[in-house]
Image (cartoon, rainbow, N blue to C red):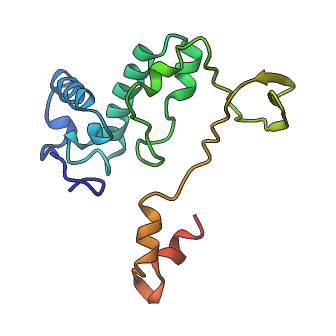
Amino acid sequence: IFLGAWADVGEKATFDVTQEERDAEYERRWKEGGVFITGGYADVMFNEKANKNVQEFFHKKTHELVNDPEVAKKLCPTNPLFCKRLTTADNWYETFNLPNVTLVDLQGMSIQELTSGGLVAGGETHELDDIVFATGFDNLTGALGAMHIEGRNGVTLKQAWSVG
């Protein structure tokens, strides 16, 4: 089981094989889809250098799929993979190549106003039909918090996670 699902998780460490072998394994997993790209090697979730290696592959794939290099860069995670949820849905990255899709990056700015035809952010008006607020969600962790898992000194998992 890997990330709460049945998955083929590799037993070797990332750097026990050549970069060419790693890239082939990453590519195989990428084609299978989903988040299991990081399951190719046993140490990806625990070894910072191993995680960085698969992250570089993930960035390369993102840049291959997204035509605009600046948009691709904004879509590449800067934190270690799986510190935050990865988006691996079918055609997610290719969506940003459509002429009617614009990534509005709110890092360092906020939405100033919602209007009947869109929104104003960073002093710029964006006309739109839909807004997708990617604010995060409580998937998987909600169920874990509800299970009353208790650790050292009687601190529940929910309590421990409440401070970040």
Indicate the quadrant containing the N terminus: top left, top right, bottom left or bottom right: bottom left
Point out residue 54 in the picture as x, y percentages from the top left corner. 32, 33
Q: Residue at x 83, y 22 (%)?
A: 124
- Where 158 sits versus 56, above or below? below
Q: Quadrant of residue 120?
A: top right
In percent of width and height, residue 14 lies at 21, 38
Picture coordinates of residue 131 (x, y %)?
Answer: 67, 35
Depicted 13 relative to depicted 121: above or below: below
Looking at the image, the residue that sits furthest to the bottom is 154
Query: Could you say which is closer to the camera, residue 112 or residue 40?
Result: 112
**Direction from residue 162 to residue 43 in the image, left or right:** left
Q: Nearer the viewer, residue 151 or 95?
A: 95
Query: What's the residue at 46%, 57% (across, down)?
Result: 139
In this rendered view, identify the residue nearer to me: 79 or 115.
115
- The number of discs equals 0
Which image quarter is the C terminus in? bottom right
Write the residue at 18% across / 43% down. Answer: 13
Q: Picture coordinates of residue 156 (x, y %)?
A: 47, 81
The answer to whether 56 is drawn above or below residue 85 in the figure is above
Q: Which image quadrant is residue 159 in?
A: bottom right
Horizontal side of 18 relative to 118 (left or right) equals left
**Viewed as shown, does residue 18 lie left or right of 31?**
left
| Quadrant in which residue 35 is drawn | top left
Horizontally, residue 96 falls left or right of residue 81, namely right
Seen in the picture, residue 14 relative to 159 is either above or below; the reply is: above
Residue at image coords 81%, 27%: 117
